[in-house]
Image (cartoon, helix red, strand yellow):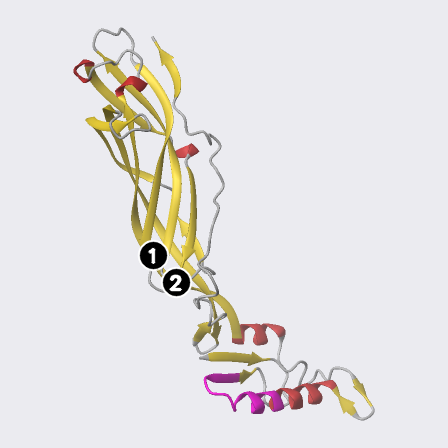
Amino acid sequence: MVKIYIDPGHGGRDSGATGNGLREKDLNLAISLKIREKLNHYQGVTVRLSRIKDRTLSLRQRTNDCVVVNSLVGTKSVQKVAELTLPITAFAGLDVLDDLVAVDVVPNLDEVTQNARIIRDKVVNIGVLPVTITVTIAGVDLPVTLSTSIPFQEHTDFPGACPEDTLQETPLEVEGIFTQPGVPVITGPVVGDLVTGILFKVVLRTNITVTRPVIQDAQGNICDVNPNRCNNIGDAPSFTLPAPENANGGIIPLSNS
């Protein structure tokens, strides 16, 4: 369904330009009525006019009669899981798993980098979460602290969402932190290059809201500003997202003593 709103300018006490026995308000109304007549011949098209006779309308009355508002497509509470496995050799002095005494992971939400895009019926979110990892090693006087970024991604089903819609997210919150020592990790180009590692997982929580622009008239009826906004156009969309500031994603030793 396509809805068209036509506003014949001037009217009533406001005659607009005059000349040769003609008044602008009359011409505007006559042309608008003729346009409505032509458009009504099409199926799936409805036409409304701000006035259909000679009457005075303020600008506020015209704009209030049909305004663009945001309509809620949906809102969801979403978990995003940041996950990374590091070899135990990343921590200087930790040669065997039995020497691992304790692990502490501190996420830095202030420096998180994330990029979200809407594709049809889905919200895609990709990012990295900076963390500080501290391990206590038997026989080593001081803990070993490393800084790195843990990648995360989340594909959320969002029926009715389209690429032209607007996406909003609440600030991320940490819902849980997990570590699992003893996980094998590949350290070389050969599959057999497996060493013992530690799995780090941080579960994040956010609320995603998707809205779309619609036209709402004085009676509360609404229709899409772009009724074809979800139609597939050509090939699937391709996105190149900006890299985080710490683009190398490497492990940066902060202290080792």
Q: Vertically, is 202 above or below 210?
A: above
Residue 81 position, x and y percent, is 29, 40
Question: Viewer-proximal residue, 251 or 17?
Answer: 251
Residue 13 sits above or below residue 253 on the image: below
Up/down of 248 relative to 114, above or below = above
Specify the amino acid type for callout 2.
Leu
Q: Whole-percent x and y of residue 238?
A: 46, 52
Count residues near mark 2 (Cα–Cα under 10 Å), then give few for <14, some for 14-19, many for 20+.
some
Which of the 4 image quarters holds residue 151?
top left
User: Judging from the image, what secondary structure is the residue with disc 1 in?
Assistant: strand
| Residue at image location 32% in from the left, 53% down from the top | 156
Which numbered tag is attached to residue 75?
A: 1
Quarter of the rendering containing residue 27:
bottom right
Badge 2 is on which residue? 72
Residue 122 image position (x, y, % from top left)? 36, 57
Nearer to me, 28 or 39: 39
Helix, strand or loop at label 2? It is: strand
Whether residue 64 can be seen here? yes
Q: How many marks?
A: 2
Q: Is residue 170 visible?
A: no
Q: Amino acid at mark 1?
A: Thr
Q: Magenta stretch?
A: 34-47
Q: How would you rate the neighbour count of disc 1 (Cα within 10 Å): few for under 14, some for 14-19, many for 20 or more?
A: some
* Quadrant of the snapshot with the C terminus: top left
Assess whether residue 160 is covered by the magenta stretch: no
Residue depicted at 49% across the width and 32% down the height: 245
